[in-house]
Each structure stands twice: as C-alpha cells, then as structure tokens.
Amino acid sequence: MTSEQTETFDLSASFKAYDVRGIVGESITAEIVEAVGAAFVDVLELEGQTVLVGGDMRPSSPEFAKAFADGQPRAAPTSSSLT
C-alpha cells in the first residue's frame, strides 16, 4: 500500500483490550500490521523518534516485525529492530 492509498481494516475480530489474536494470513496480515505501524507512530505522536520493534518465536514474527517497521517510515520516525 502506498502513502497515497487509504484502506480501512476491520480490526475488531483481532484487536482486543489487552492483546491481538487472529489467524496469520487471514485476520492478521502483513498489510494490516504495516498500517498498524503507521498508526502507532501517528497516534502516539512519535514522529522523528526511535521506535524499537521486536518479535517472539512464532514463524510470523520476522515478517510482522518488518511490516510494522515498514509502516513507520510513512510517519517518519527512525525504526530499530530487536530481532
């Protein structure tokens, strides 16, 4: 998705008050994680600040950590990976 495109995602099935749960590739995709990365920086007003991105042992972690970090340049911070 380019910065000129806007897409709406229904996150209600996966994003809860204390966690994110879903099926990789279905309810949670790299495209959604990228959009969440951009929103994270925007909502928390982190533009120009360093954001650390990590993951866990799940096979989807490297792809999702990269997608989250890839969404952040749209909001212009510096992103560093912990994985």
Image (cartoon, helix red, strand yellow):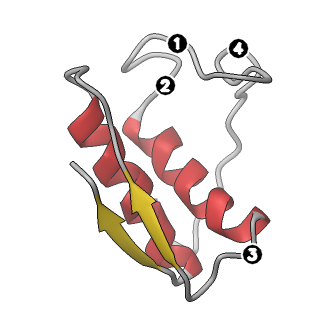
Does residue 61 sit above or below 58 in this rendering?
Answer: below
Looking at the rendered structure, the secondary structure element under dot 2 is: loop
Is any part of residue 14 visible from this angle?
Answer: yes
The numbered mark at residue 45 is: 3
Q: CA distance from mark 4 to mark 1?
A: 8 Å
Label 2 CA crowd tier, 10 Å (few <14, some 14–19, many 20+): some
The numbered mark at residue 13 is: 4
Asked if the residue under mark 3 is in contact with the one under mark 1, i.e. CB atoms within 8 Å, the reply is no
* Residue at which label 1 appears: 22
Q: CA distance from mark 4 to mark 2?
A: 10 Å
Looking at the rendered structure, the secondary structure element under dot 1 is: loop
| Residue 63 drawn at (x, y percent) | 25, 40
Badge 4 or badge 2: first in the primary sequence: 4
| Residue 78 drawn at (x, y percent) | 42, 81
* Residue at which label 2 appears: 28
Label 3 CA crowd tier, 10 Å (few <14, some 14–19, many 20+): few
Label 1 CA crowd tier, 10 Å (few <14, some 14–19, many 20+): few
